[in-house]
Amino acid sequence: MADREGRSHGVARVTATVLVGLAVFAACAVEMVEALTIVLAAGLTRGWRSALEGSALAVLVLAAIVAAVGPALIHLIPMSVLRVVVGSLLLVLGLQWLGKAILRASGHKALRDEVAIYKREVTRLSGLPLRGSGRDAAGFVISFKGVFLEGLEVVMIVLTLGLSSGNLGVAVIGAGSAVVLVGIVGAVLARQLSEVPENSMKMGVGLMLVTFGTFWGGEGAGLQWPGADLALFGLLALYGVTAWVAVGLLTRSRRQSGAAETT
């Protein structure tokens, strides 16, 4: 009996680890697509030197933040407190992503189009004056801002998911894999970033972030989840069904409103 329970617990832990890796990978891939859109637009319109220098500086600043904040989170904050805080942050972030994804899936909000965003950035940047020195302040600042802001969200996701689950290494690998994959896709597709199914990914990421936020927030508050880590599947199913019902209700409401307006 003890061996069977041990194997069951081991399977649950491995499954939870895989879910953490997938959640980090998907979330980071979405953020990197958005950052890459900005860098491509800045590079092609303002010059690659300034765009790449701005991106590189943003990465260095983010690395410094991780080096300063990461150890403090690990050594100074009790795990129970960290899980409550992290759970709350993940719930807020996940609900934002999930809410937007539900609105887009139901037709109440326009689908995010990276190609259209890219074209808008190109048009806006093309109208700014260029300097002849080989460096362009606008391209540098825009690339820095895009990479830093999206990267900061990646850092938060990696630290919160990785530290709370005790799988920081898995989270880092997931984030690194997403960065490499999106970089390769961006280099190959360049302007065809719409090939990346970002809107579908945001729905899945939102569900996983809300699931982990609920699970770790409950653990930090002293709640004993039935089945330990296996409760993640129950929470994920619950939120998935809720999102599916919400999409259906909102879609029906939009169609009824449209029919009423045409009569």
Image: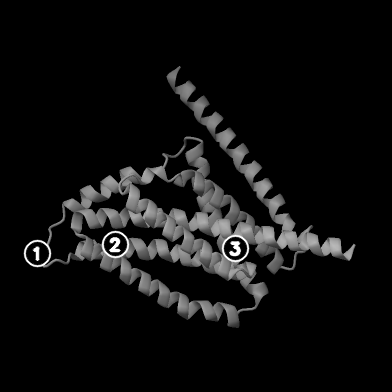
**Which residue shows up at 72% across the image and 50% down it?**
234
Mark 2 vs mark 1: which is more N-terminal? 1
Circle 2 crowding by C-alpha within 10 Å: few under 14, some 14–19, many from 20: many
Circle 1 crowding by C-alpha within 10 Å: few under 14, some 14–19, many from 20: few
Q: Does residue 2 appear to the left or right of 98 in the view shown?
A: right
Q: Does residue 123 appear to the left or right of 255 in the view shown?
A: left
**Which residue shows up at 55% across the image and 51% down it?**
206
Front: mark 1 or 3? 1
Mark 1 vs mark 3: which is more N-terminal? 3
The amino acid marked with disc number 1 is: Gly
The amino acid marked with disc number 2 is: Ser
Q: Which residue is mark 3?
A: 88
Q: Which residue is mark 2?
A: 143
Q: CA distance from mark 3 to mark 2?
A: 30 Å
Q: Does residue 205 appear to the left or right of 179 in the view shown?
A: right
Q: Position of residue 212 (x, y in %)?
A: 63, 59
Q: Does residue 124 appear to the left or right of 164 in the view shown?
A: left
Circle 3 crowding by C-alpha within 10 Å: few under 14, some 14–19, many from 20: some
The amino acid marked with disc number 3 is: Ser
Q: Position of residue 117 (x, y in %)?
A: 32, 47
Q: CA distance from mark 1 to mark 3?
A: 49 Å
Q: Position of residue 191 (x, y in %)?
A: 30, 46
Disc 2 on helix, strand or loop?
helix
Residue 210: tell me if it is visible: yes
**Which residue shows up at 32% across the image and 69% down it?**
56
